[in-house]
Image (spheres, rainbow, N blue to C red):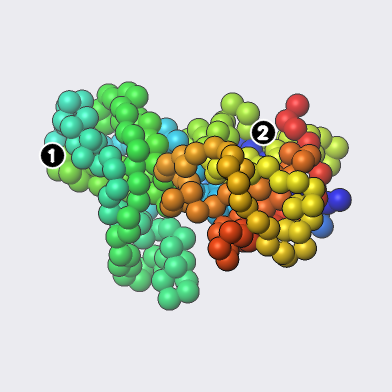
Amino acid sequence: MPPCGLLNLNKPAGMTSRQAVDNVQRLARPAKAGHAGTLDPLAHGVLVVGVGSATRLIEYVQRMPKRYVGTFLLGRQSATEDIEGDVTELPGAPLPTREQIEAAAGRFVGRIEQRPPAFSAVKIRGRPAYKLARQGKPIALEPRPVEIYRIEIKAYRYPELVLEIECGGGTYVRSLGRDLAESLGTAAVMSALERTSIGSLRIEEAINPRELTRDNWLPFLQPALRAVEYLPRVQLSAEEAVRLRNGLTIEMGGEGRGTGECLPPAASPECGELAAIDPAGQLVGILVPGNPGQWRSVRILPTVTHSSTP
């Protein structure tokens, strides 16, 4: 059977997310590969790549909380909101204290409205905003809701500020630094960014994509089940697994069939989704309520092969 699972990559700075995926694609061919959340070339750290039918689960990986360590230079600004653009220093910029930064950061924890950077992949009339920005065209992106779970100051010596941030999908860390600085009456550019985890996929377990070869990559493939580890699970019989893989519904009655709990913030509302597991412990697919007393699949994975990280 073709390989299926997740690769936890430690993308180096200077490499694009597309280049990292292309490295995997060459090794996994003819299986597909796709990443679950872009990292800018400036950034390094965890980049999760789905391989084979696990690419159907990328949206579930994107729901997982993410952790970053971002470094910012206060009193500076650029069009790209990082040091990749032309950086200018603000004359007479204020020097906020650590206590002032902590107080301001607390106001950004929770569900906030964030305006994405002009130099981003957000689409405007079907075109990425960064392509329009490079042409000098005016960009007006609408704010959108994002979730910030935690902001902690790791180090501060003006102008350098290092923050550890835990947030939901769709958050732009450089824009968070921009808005935090603006709330303090100054500006900021991001000078470095490390993504340290996506869910339980941590940088300590990640592999540099440049170190992968045709001879060694398969043992690093994680089970597809890790993409939905936060969902409540249900154990299927062999017959139920076959029914689901044949596009049929199954009855889900009786006490104790489902296991686990809703685990916010990632779990779907009211535990409306279940991860269905076959007798071999493999993920069969994602189930949602169908007709009364029945469950139907919204994502199905074939019987697959994978290897565990050595």
302 left or right, relative to 147: right
Task: Kindly give the residue lying farthest to the bottom in the view shown.
Answer: 125
Compared to 88, does 129 lie above or below? below
In which quarter of the view is residue 309 placed? Answer: top right
The residue at which mark 1 appears reads as 92
For mark 1, give the secondary structure. loop
Going from N to C along the chain, the mark reached first, 2 or 1, is 1
Residue at (45% x, 36% y) in the render: 67
Residue at (52% x, 49% y) in the render: 62
In which quarter of the view is residue 228 placed? Answer: top right
Compared to 46, does 32 lie above or below? below
The residue at which mark 2 appears reads as 207
152 left or right, relative to 201: left
Compared to 35, does 247 lie above or below? below
The C terminus - image quarter: top right
Residue at (32% x, 23% y) in the render: 155
For mark 2, give the secondary structure. loop
* Percent x, y of residue 299: 65, 58
251 left or right, relative to 76: right
* Percent x, y of residue 303: 80, 50
* Percent x, y of residue 265: 42, 43
Query: Do the CB atoms of the residues marked 2 and 1 lie less than 8 Å apart?
Result: no
* Three-letter code for the amino acid on which mark 1 is drawn: Gly
Instruction: For marks 2 and 1, give the one nearer the viewer.
Output: 2
Cα distance, mark 2 to mark 1?
A: 44 Å
* Percent x, y of residue 225: 66, 42
Compared to 98, does 215 lie above or below? below
